Structures are given as C-alpha cells and as structure tokens.
Image (cartoon, coloured by chain):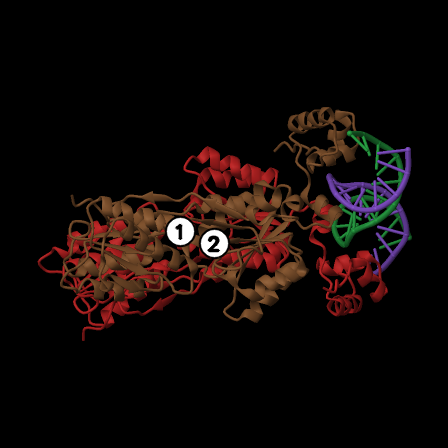
Chain colours: A brown, B red, C green, D purple
DNA sequence: CTGAAAGCGCTTACAG
DNA sequence: CTGAAAGCGCTTACAG
C-alpha cells in the first residue's frame, strides 16, 4: 500500500504563498479575507485535496465538533432512519454525532444530557419528538447555553429553531385523495393523544371532509395511540358497524397495518372492499401486503437540515434569530400503493 | 453554570509526583510501570476524575480511535439495534463509530471502505452480514492491514475473529419446543439461500424432527428469502394443502408475520388452529398480533463484544490469534409468545 | 485584510 | 522502571 502523505495546512499555505492563518480563515468562512486570496487558497486546497485534521482543530479551538442527538424510542423506524442520515451528514461535515436515548426517568435523561454538555462538550443538540417537548430538558439546554434544534415539536415554538413538515396539510391531502377516488365513508383512527401530530392529522382529516361537504358519523372516528394493538381495537369496532366505512385513514402505518390484518381476518378484501391508508412511510408500509398507501416524511432531508444548522455559519445562525426564521417546513409526499384504490 | 476545569494529564502527574509520561503509560496499560507507581497514579486519576482529552491523544498518537461499521440493509431492525449498542459501547470507551452502508455496487462500497481506511484512518472495522462475506471487501481490509471483526459470517472463518450465535442449535431447540407442545406436522419456510444462517436454521429444523423420529412430507418445506412477500407465497402453498401442518417455523420474523396474515385471511386462527414461530425477535415480532414466538439474538451483547475486541488490548488481541480464539459464540434465547401453543 | 507567536493536551522517540 | 524534550496540526489572541 502506498502511503500518501496527507496535506497539512502548512503545505497549503506554502503553495498558496500565504500564512497558515489565512488558510485557516478561508476554511472557517471568515469574511475578512480578500476574494483574490480566498480563491487562490481554495484552488490549492482542491488541488492538494486538503482536509483539515479534525483532532488538531478540536484541540486548538476547544470546540468539540460534536453534535448530540436525543431520541425516545429506538425501535421506531423513524428514529433509525433519521439517525443514519444525521450520521452521514455529520461525517461529511467533519462533525461527529453522539447519540443518546432518553430514559423513562427524566432525571437520568437530564444527567445524560448534562454529561453531553460537560464531558463531551457538544456544540449543539438535536431533539427528536416527543422528547423535544420535555420542559426539563429544554430548560437544561437553555441554561447551559447550548444551541439546539427540535424536530416536529409541539409546543414552545419560539424558543428554538425547529424542523417539521405540514402534518395538517398532508392529512388533508391524503383524505382528499380518498375523496377523489370516490370514497365518502372515510373512517379515521387518531394517533397518540400525547403527540401534537395526532391532533394535526385529525384536524386535516376533519377539514378535508368538511370542505368537501361530507358528513361523518362519530362511529367513524376512533382514538388510537400509534400502536398496532390500538389499531386492532379501533378497527374491530369500526369494521363491525352495520354501515362500514369504505376507507380508513389510520394516523400511522402501524395502525394501518393492524386495520388490514383485522379486515383480512374478517374476509374483507383490501383494497377491493376497503381502502386503508397510513402515515409516515415506515418500513412496515412496504413489508406488509398489500403495501400501504401513506405519507412520506422527508426524514433524510430533515436530518441533513438539522445538522447543517450547526455546521454552516453556526454562530451567525443561532445568534439573533428572528422568530420567523425559526421554522423550517419540509415537503411531504403522498405515496399511492396497493392498500387503497378508486371506487368510481 | 459553574465551569469546572477539567483535569489534564499534567495535573495528575503533579499530584502524583511523577512525570506526564508515567501517567500516560499507566493510562495506556503499559506493563513497564511499577505497581506502586501505577496504583498511586490511578488513585489520583480517580480522585480528579481525570479523563484524557481524546483530540490531543488522537493528534499526538496518530491513531484515530475510530471504528468503522459496515452494514447492508438499513431498514433491518437488527442493524439499527446493533448500531445503537455499538455506538454506546464506543462512546464509553473513548472511541467513535463511523457508520457506512454497503452499496449495491461493490466498487462504490470498496471506495467507501478505502476512504474509511485512508481518510478516517479507522483503527478497525466491524462487518455485519451479509457484507461480511464479500470477498473483495475482506481482501481490501487484509491488504490494508486493518483489523476487522465479522458478525455471523458464513465463510472463510479463519481469517478474522467473528461473533455469532448458534443458529443451528436455536432452530433445533425451537423446533423441539413445538414437538414437545404436541406438534408433529411442522412446516418450515427456509430463509434467503444466499445467507448461511438459512442453511443452519433449516438443518436445525430437520435434525430436530429426525431425532424425534418424525417424518415430514416435502410439501411442508418451502423456500423463502426472508421477505414478508416470500413468506406469503410460501404460506399460501402450505395452507392450501389438504393435510395442513399444525405449526409453521419461518426462518425469520418477517416471514412468520406473513404466515399469520395469510392464515387469518383464510379464517385459520393463530394459535388455536395453527402455531407460528419466527426467528430474530425483531420489533415486528411484538408489533403484530398475536405476538410472535421467536428466537432472540443477543444483539446488544454482540455489538458490545465486537467493540471491545478493539478497545481492550487490541494489539495483543489481533496479533497472533489462534484459530480457536477467533470464534465468539453468544447465547440465544427462545421467547415464547402468543403465536404458538401446546396442542396436547 | 494578513501574519508571527504561543499553546491546546497528549504521545513518540530517545535517554538513562 | 522513569523522565525531559519535541512535536502532532490546527486556532486564539494579539499586532499591524
């Protein structure tokens, strides 16, 4: 193996005919460098394929180049996908991601967060739902003056930048898709009442019906809690009605899968006798049969964006943010699959 | 916030009345330190809660303290659980994990691995199945002299340490559990033919039947490929037999879930009319209803062990390993749930 | 807008 | 078995 010597900042400086400091400034996006110098340096950087030594950088700057990620439920497909994307994104930006699971016991979680702050010295934190709404954790971060970003938060929307998608609109559109396919008897299984998205999705469903002048009996609406189990209970009730719905919109894929399972066990064919749609586009959606029509969240984008908030012009970004700039709404996409169909 | 100053190696040296070098030696487990000095240093380290600065260490030693993890399928629950455990374990050992997904295109994967070796300078690699059996990747690692550990490899078992569980025995035991519950008509859906574990599980099933003197017609055995879809196809065939099996052992949970779905759609009650068992204990096993009886792999242990091979006495471990020391077999556990029951 | 000096906290290589 | 010196590759703080 030929050992290629890695270029150092000194090599770049020498070849560009400037000091190491100037190279450092260019690399750290310091505006106080003349355009001429900057482009010269960047050319040499590219030519030498120079990449800064992260350890040296960390050591000298006393910045950690670490980001923390706090999540709740590790078995959630959403979490692992977000994690993977965040990991990649950090890596390509010279950062490292330190991942931590929130404990049921809030004190343990707080201790863990404090460790991230004081030991690992994270430069920032990413909070996933629903832990992103825990007051104690937010207060801790605020007190320690550690910048943080939240994903799909439900409350205190002005205290930090956050990333979300328009759950309301997605639910509205998804419901309207069913309506356009000729469905008017559309049931809904509401998600976990403790999560804001459940409310938003429910409201989107209601408003789509309303704006299409469709009346829905109360029996078509059941409370679930995002688990497969809760979906089964709800489906059992709804599918034992004399006047059954022709379509059911479950607030997540797990519950949608449960609906299909119950339907099949009762000899109700999906999608011929019943259309089923879910939400999230987790792996479950394509693992069961028929594949579930659902709403895809742009998880990869969300993760990449969350990381980039810290890596690019971080200080500028986090200081003096106006409320209007806090929110980052990403696009969702409705994925039409085999579990639902037009009945016109 | 009270900013507690972190102890440095100098502080420890001073208080212990030795040089920094001696402290460094103690910390790096250098045997050439007198016991007396060592214990004195360790006492001060504990007292000061001294933790070495990783960046300084990396910079000075030119070691990366990075471990690479290469996996295939990110949607696999197995992968994300392994990942999370490995991440934790690395963190508590002052290492960092760089995670990479194998590409369909082997050349891209190789490039990525080379980047890990040459840019990130990983101190070691962890290979998950099935990528752990890719000849090109193994050769690449071997050529670069990067130590690596494989999880559940299928071939070339003498070229690297590896971690596995006894798939054969687990399948044997699981099948025997069904037999003891009174089942004699037991079907099997074989896993992906490209993965060694499929063979082992199949063999365990066969031998359990044989050692209990049970004959099984060929229609009771179907080839699957670990996907839900393939499980459906297999189940459809097996459950349309005139003389149906009373139990089906699917080589993983996805296929077991598919069997239950097909059964339910045909009005066959699980577990009253049909017992179904899976393998892996992925999240799917407890998300569907009834929960799936399955075999739990000790994924957390596997991950922790894989990491520890690099972090503790690494050089000693990887040099001059005897073949007998390469293999690390961990315990599995059969998890009895609601999808199977005794019919005696 | 640019640079010379000092230093971050460790380890390597050399002495003894 | 132990230590004094030099240096890893950057950035901070100070000058100009």
Mark 2: which secondary structure?
loop
Residue occupying the point 67% across, 60% down? A144
Q: Of the numbered discs in the image, which one, if any, rests on residue A264?
A: none
Which residue occupies the foreground of this view, D14 or B59? D14
At x 49%, y 51%, the residue is A83
Q: Position of residue B102 (x, y in %)?
A: 45, 41
**Residue B5 placed where, x, y %?**
77, 61
**Residue drawn at 34 percent across, 59 percent down:** B284
- Residue A4 percent coordinates (x, y): 66, 32
Question: As drawn, is D6 to the left or to the right of A223?
Answer: right
Task: Using residue D6 as the reference point, say whether residue B159 is left or right of it.
Answer: left
Mark 1 lies on residue: A167
In the rendered view, tell whether residue A270 sits above or below residue B49.
above
**Visible in this render: residue B252?**
no
Give the labeled residue for mark 2: A152
Between A315 and B284, the one lying in front of the other is A315
Q: Secondary structure at mark 1?
A: helix
Please determine if labels 2 and 1 lie on a single subunit.
yes
What is the quadrant of residue B80 in the picture? Answer: bottom left
Q: In the image, residue B297 lies at what x, y percent?
A: 40, 61
- Few, some or many residues within 10 Å of mark 1 (<14, 14–19, 20+): many
- Label 1 near label 2: C-beta < 8 Å? yes
Q: Chain of mark 1?
A: A
Quadrant location of the N terminus of chain A?
A: top right
Compare residues B73 and B195 and report the one nearer the observer.
Answer: B73
């Amino acid at each position: 193996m030929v050992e290629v010597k890695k270029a150092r900042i000194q090599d770049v400086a020498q070849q560009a005919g400037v000091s190491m400091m100037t190279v450092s400034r260019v690399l750290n996006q310091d505006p106080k460098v003349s355009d001429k110098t900057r482009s010269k340096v960047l050319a040499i950087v590219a030519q030498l394929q120079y990449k800064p030594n992260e350890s040296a950088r960390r050591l000298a700057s006393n910045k950690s180049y670490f980001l923390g990620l706090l999540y709740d439920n590790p078995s959630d497909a959403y979490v692992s996908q977000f994690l993977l994307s965040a990991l990649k994104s950090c890596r390509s930006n010279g950062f490292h991601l330190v991942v931590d699971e929130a404990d049921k016991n809030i004190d343990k979680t707080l201790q863990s967060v404090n460790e991230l702050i004081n030991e690992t010295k994270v430069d920032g934190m990413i909070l996933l739902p629903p832990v992103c709404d825990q007051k104690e954790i937010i207060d801790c971060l605020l007190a320690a003056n550690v910048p943080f970003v939240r994903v799909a938060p439900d409350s205190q929307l002005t205290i930090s930048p956050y990333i979300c998608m328009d759950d309301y609109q997605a639910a509205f559109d998804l419901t309207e898709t069913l309506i356009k396919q000729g469905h008017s008897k559309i049931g809904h299984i509401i998600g976990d009442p403790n999560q804001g998205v459940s409310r938003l999705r429910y409201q989107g469903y209601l408003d789509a019906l309303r704006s299409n002048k469709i009346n829905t009996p109360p029996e078509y609406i059941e409370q679930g809690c995002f688990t497969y189990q809760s979906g089964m209970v709800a489906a059992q009730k709804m599918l034992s009605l004399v006047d059954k719905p022709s379509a059911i919109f479950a607030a997540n894929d797990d519950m949608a899968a449960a609906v299909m399972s119950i339907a099949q066990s009762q000899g109700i064919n999906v999608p011929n006798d019943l259309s089923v749609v879910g939400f999230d586009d987790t792996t479950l959606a394509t693992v069961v049969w028929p594949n579930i029509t659902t709403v895809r969240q742009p998880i990869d984008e969300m993760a990449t964006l969350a990381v980039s908030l810290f890596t690019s012009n971080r200080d500028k970004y986090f200081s003096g943010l106006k409320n209007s700039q806090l929110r980052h709404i990403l696009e969702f996409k409705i994925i039409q699959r085999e579990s639902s169909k037009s009945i016109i």
